[in-house]
Image: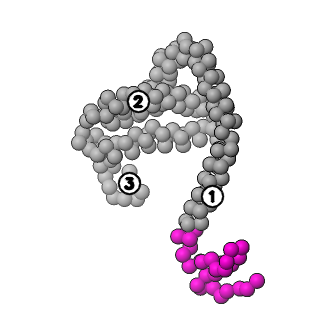
Amino acid sequence: MAFLGSNISPDVGLRLLLCPLGSNVVLRTACCSVGVVLPVYSTFKAIETKNQDDQHKWLVYWAAYGSFTVAEIFTDKLLHWCPFYYHLKFAFLVWLQLPSVEGARVLYMNHLRPFLRRHQSRLDQIVNFLYGEMVKFASNHETEIQVTRAVFAKILLSANQMVREIMHPTQRQIGGPGQHVQTSDSESEDEE
């Protein structure tokens, strides 16, 4: 299978992934693609087609993936030096999704679900406390949040204008403040 119409052999990508001395950039990209990009698109498709089985499958996947991500926060610092760390991570992410083994479902049913059910009442208390604290924080800092939102909106507007100017360099603004007359070097100027 040619990638984007290229003449690169299909086993080149596999060799890059499996090479123990391969670049971590390739492996990290593969982990992100397999662990996040593909599941996001598959989740989108499950939602749009309203297929309840697929929706359930991807909810279970995201629960398993989220748990893995939380565990990885702690283990990453201990294991990142291992030369096969990203190979193992990639293999685990593939295992989570493989239809033949349904790794996410196995992880959820055998480990995550029993743990969450056993600690559900305590976790509910923690979640309710954290939610209440977020609401208090948001209401106590409503002015700052509004100012931040306004600044962010202005930054996005400026970035949008810069992108438009880069994409259409022949158009330029003339006139002072309040006058929005655009001209193009190839068109005659119209006066209003």
Badge 1 is on which residue? 154
Nearer-N-terminus badge (3/2): 3
Residue 111 position within the rendered picture, expressed as x and y whole percent measured from the top left: 47, 17
Crowd band around label 1 with a 10 angstrom C-alpha radius: few (<14), some (14–19), many (20+): few
Q: Which mark is residue 2?
A: 3
Secondary structure category for the residue under label 2: helix
Question: What amino acid is at disc 3?
Answer: Ala
Do tag 1 and tag 2 residues touch (Cβ < 8 Å)? no
Residue kind at label 2, given as amino acid type: Glu
Q: Residue at position x 41%, y 34% from top?
A: 94
Q: Distance from label 1 to label 2 (Cα)?
A: 36 Å
Q: Position of residue 109 (x, y in %)?
A: 51, 18
Q: Residue furthest left?
A: 21
For the point 38% across and 51% down, the residue is 1
Residue numbers of the magenta segment: 164-192
Q: Nearer the viewer, residue 42 or 115?
A: 115
Q: Quadrant of the C terminus?
A: bottom right
Which residue is denoted by mark 2 in the rendering?
72
Verify whether residue 171 appears in magenta.
Answer: yes
Do residues under tags 1 and 3 come within 8 Å of each other at their CB atoms?
Answer: no
Q: Residue at x 69, y 36 (%)?
A: 139
Does any portion of residue 80 appear in the rendered image?
A: yes
- Counting residues from the start of the chain, the first of labels 1 and 3 encountered is 3
- Disc 3 to disc 2: CB gap under 8 Å: no
Please name the amino acid that badge 1 sits on.
Lys
Dot 3: what SS? loop
Judge depth for marks 1 and 3 and give the one in front: 1
